[in-house]
């Protein structure tokens, strides 16, 4: 197939390009940012998804697409309108082009943050959605749009709700826990936890996700929303201690008061993934941390 990847210069996008490079598919890498020279792709396009004509120019010549482009969560809190322009209206440009040009399948990266307040764990796909950020609202809206586009226009889609993704090409500047903590520990800087550090999260290695994206684009699973997490709950304090073991440093861990809006436990129910694909993400957290730190040492000179 000829596959367009929107958001190809981003964290998951860079990993997806590498995953697709191991296949025979033709890849069109699209992003508003410049793509690194070493990124593997067959064609590239500078595309702002809010530009409908630019999106259509790409989509008119592909068989399938992966839509990873997004205005991030923190930036969305500062500018909700811009978040909606990119994450909702920009996505509708992608969907409209896809339905106009009979694209076989659209993959969309959603986010577990649309769940909001957690009522039960592990969190299933049918857990009530109560998003508590503009970013979460936008992701939830697009999931609803995809269902409507399928019913009205027969556009097939596949949605993965990402949990706490980590891995190569994720920089500390992202604010994500794993690269921030690994970087600080490696530079002998302190880290902190809020409360007792026993809040749990679901850490999933990025190449597990990209493997499933390719499998989803190639396979028969369609018109589904699927959790993309490890299905394992890891306490924040335990995660920090395991990162310290990878780096080989015993860091100073500062204790800070618990945040009032802190979610105690949050991890994915992966039973639907098992049912649809016959397997679930398999990279152990320690193995993923080793690979991530190896990349960071080479890329960031730690």
Image (spheres, helix red, strand yellow):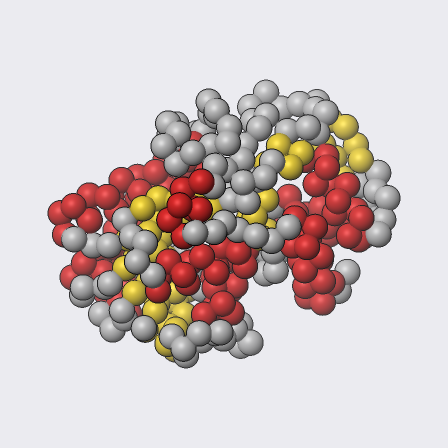
Q: Residue furthest top?
A: 260
Residue 284 in picture, x, y percent from top left:
64, 50
Compared across the picture, whether 62 is left or right of 200 comes to left
Where 91 sits versus 119, above or below? below
Between residues 35 and 197, which one lies in front from this camera angle?
197
Where 123 sits versus 241, above or below? above
Q: Which residue is drawn at 77% across and 60% down?
A: 302
Q: Which residue lies furthest to the right in this view?
A: 250
Residue 35 in picture, x, y percent from top left:
49, 70
Q: Which residue is drawn at 34% across and 61% down?
A: 219
**Is any atom of residue 82 visible in this view?**
no
Between residues 16 and 302, which one lies in front from this camera angle?
16
Where 159 sits versus 27, above or below? above
Residue 39 in picture, x, y percent from top left:
52, 73
Q: In which quarter of the image is residue 197?
A: top right
Q: Residue at x 37, y 58 (%)?
A: 216
**Is any atom of residue 241 visible in this view?**
yes
Which quadrant of the figure contains the N terminus?
A: bottom left
Residue 85 in picture, x, y percent from top left:
32, 47
Compared across the picture, whether 32 is left or right of 52 comes to right
């Amino acid at each position: 197939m000829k596959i367009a990847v929107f958001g190809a210069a981003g964290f998951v996008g860079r990993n997806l390009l590498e995953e697709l490079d191991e296949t025979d598919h033709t890849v069109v890498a699209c992003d508003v940012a410049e793509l690194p020279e070493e990124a593997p792709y067959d064609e590239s396009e500078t595309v702002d998804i809010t530009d409908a004509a630019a999106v259509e120019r790409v989509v008119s010549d592909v068989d399938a697409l992966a839509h990873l482009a997004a205005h991030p969560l923190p930036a969305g809190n500062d500018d909700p309108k811009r978040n909606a322009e990119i994450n909702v209206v920009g996505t509708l440009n992608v969907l409209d082009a896809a339905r106009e040009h009979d694209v076989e399948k659209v993959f969309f990266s959603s986010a577990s943050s649309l769940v909001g307040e957690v009522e039960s764990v592990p969190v299933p796909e049918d857990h009530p959605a109560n998003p508590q950020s503009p970013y979460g609202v936008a992701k939830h809206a697009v999931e609803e749009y995809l269902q409507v586009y399928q019913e009205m226009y027969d556009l097939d889609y596949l949605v993965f709700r990402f949990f706490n993704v980590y891995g190569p090409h994720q920089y500390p500047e992202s604010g994500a826990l794993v690269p921030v903590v690994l970087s600080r520990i490696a530079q002998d800087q302190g880290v902190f936890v809020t409360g007792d550090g026993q809040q749990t999260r679901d850490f999933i290695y990025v190449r597990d996700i990209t493997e499933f994206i390719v499998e989803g684009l190639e396979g028969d699973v369609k018109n589904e929303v699927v959790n993309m997490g490890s299905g394992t709950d890891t306490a924040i304090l335990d995660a920090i201690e395991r990162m310290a073991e990878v780096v080989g440093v015993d860091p100073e861990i500062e204790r800070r008061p618990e945040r009032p809006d802190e979610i105690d436990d949050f991890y994915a129910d992966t039973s639907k993934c098992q049912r649809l694909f016959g397997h679930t993400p398999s990279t152990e957290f320690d193995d993923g941390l080793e690979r991530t730190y190896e990349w960071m040492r080479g890329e960031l000179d730690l």
